[in-house]
Image (spheres, rainbow, N blue to C red):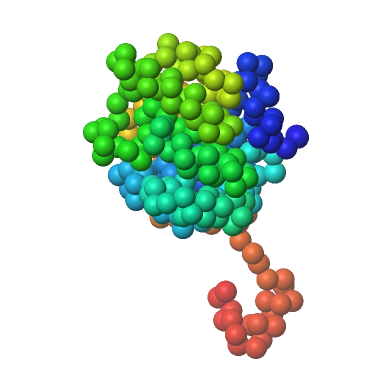
């Protein structure tokens, strides 16, 4: 498979749907990469699905670097995009560029993603000006969950719809190569996609975006809790792991594991020497 680049993604608009999934570790990245996923997103969603936080605001730069490094080691084909975490791009342009640069130089990501519209245009312009590709993210922005008051559909009113369309256009002008549209009504997402020349990748934004992204843990059913409406669950890994664990527990308690196939044995000669030397008694 050919290496996916920023230009590869940009050329897919209006020609071929873009596929994107989250990855937070080496084995997951390797599986998704081998399957042919276009973009691996090291999302700050790792705060919830890997680290057990209630939301993404607790995720740090060190968390993101740690997981981005792991994902980069498992990928040879996919484009790796890493999230800039909460407050890593709000404390001045110098700090913003530094943090974005770390995800590229230390984490080996190919691009960074940051949330927000008009309020982050200066940051997008500065990061891209430093030679770092940027993916935008508007609609439901989880880092702003406290301000939004919950996980709600965005862009349902006329004013909000106009704002989101304008934000997408301005984010493109600021230099972003793509944009994520999260939890936006299908009709509005279609309009936004048609209003910009860069790819719009949807999550809970309908089929008319240029691509789709999901949290892999949702996709494969890693949790037994409620699945978001916009998720199609393609597997139930939670049940697979649960069943395997219960079987393992029973096998160990019933002395059925390890069996002969899972043991290592001494040769007859080595066993005799250990017996003769008094290291092992004859009952072994």
Pinpoint residue 140: horizontal percent, then vertical percent.
36, 29
Which is more toward the observer, 270 or 30? Answer: 30
Which is more toward the observer, 149 or 191? Answer: 191
Q: Residue most toward the top?
A: 187
Which residue is located at x 63 percent, y 32 percent? 38
Which residue is located at x 59 percent, y 43 percent? 129
Quadrant hosting residue 269: bottom right
The image shows a total of numbered marks equal to: 0
Which residue is located at x 40 percent, y 22 percent? 164
Quadrant hosting residue 76: top right
Pinpoint residue 189: horizontal percent, then vertical percent.
45, 17
**Quadrant assignment for the C terminus:** bottom right
Which residue is located at x 33 percent, y 20 percent? 160
**Quadrant assignment for the N terminus:** top right
Which is more toward the observer, 70 or 83? Answer: 83
Pinpoint residue 70: horizontal percent, then vertical percent.
57, 52
256 is higher (above) or lower (below) than 116: below
Q: Is residue 35 visible?
A: no
Q: Residue most toward the bottom?
A: 277
Q: Is residue 56 visible?
A: yes
Which is more toward the observer, 183 or 98? Answer: 98
Pinpoint residue 271: horizontal percent, then vertical percent.
67, 76
In this picture, residue 269 sits left or right of residue 261: right
Q: Residue most toward the left?
A: 149
């Amino acid at each position: 498979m050919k290496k996916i680049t920023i230009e590869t993604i940009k050329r897919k608009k209006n020609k071929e749907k873009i596929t994107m999934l989250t990855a937070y570790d080496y084995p997951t990245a390797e599986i998704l990469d081998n399957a042919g996923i276009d973009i691996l997103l090291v999302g700050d969603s790792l705060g919830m699905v890997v680290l057990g936080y209630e939301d993404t605001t607790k995720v740090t730069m060190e968390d993101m670097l740690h997981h981005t490094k792991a994902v980069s080691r498992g990928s040879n084909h996919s484009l790796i995009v890493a999230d800039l975490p909460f407050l890593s791009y709000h404390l001045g342009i110098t700090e913003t560029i530094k943090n974005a640069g770390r995800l590229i130089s230390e984490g080996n990501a190919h691009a960074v993603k940051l949330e927000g519209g008009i309020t982050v245009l200066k940051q997008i312009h500065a990061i891209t000006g430093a030679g770092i590709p940027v993916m935008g993210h508007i609609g439901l922005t989880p880092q702003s969950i406290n301000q939004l008051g919950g996980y709600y559909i965005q862009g349902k009113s006329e004013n909000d719809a106009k704002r989101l369309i304008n934000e997408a256009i301005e984010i493109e002008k600021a230099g972003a190569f793509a944009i994520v549209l999260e939890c936006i009504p299908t009709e509005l997402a279609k309009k936004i996609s048609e209003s910009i020349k860069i790819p719009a990748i949807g999550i809970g934004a309908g089929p008319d975006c240029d691509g789709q992204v999901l949290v892999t843990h949702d996709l494969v059913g890693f949790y037994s809790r409620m699945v978001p409406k916009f998720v199609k669950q393609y597997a139930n890994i939670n049940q697979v792991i649960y069943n395997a664990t219960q079987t393992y527990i029973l096998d160990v308690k019933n002395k059925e594991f390890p069996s002969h196939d899972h043991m290592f044995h001494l040769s007859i000669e080595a066993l005799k020497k250990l017996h003769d030397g008094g290291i092992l008694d004859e009952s072994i």
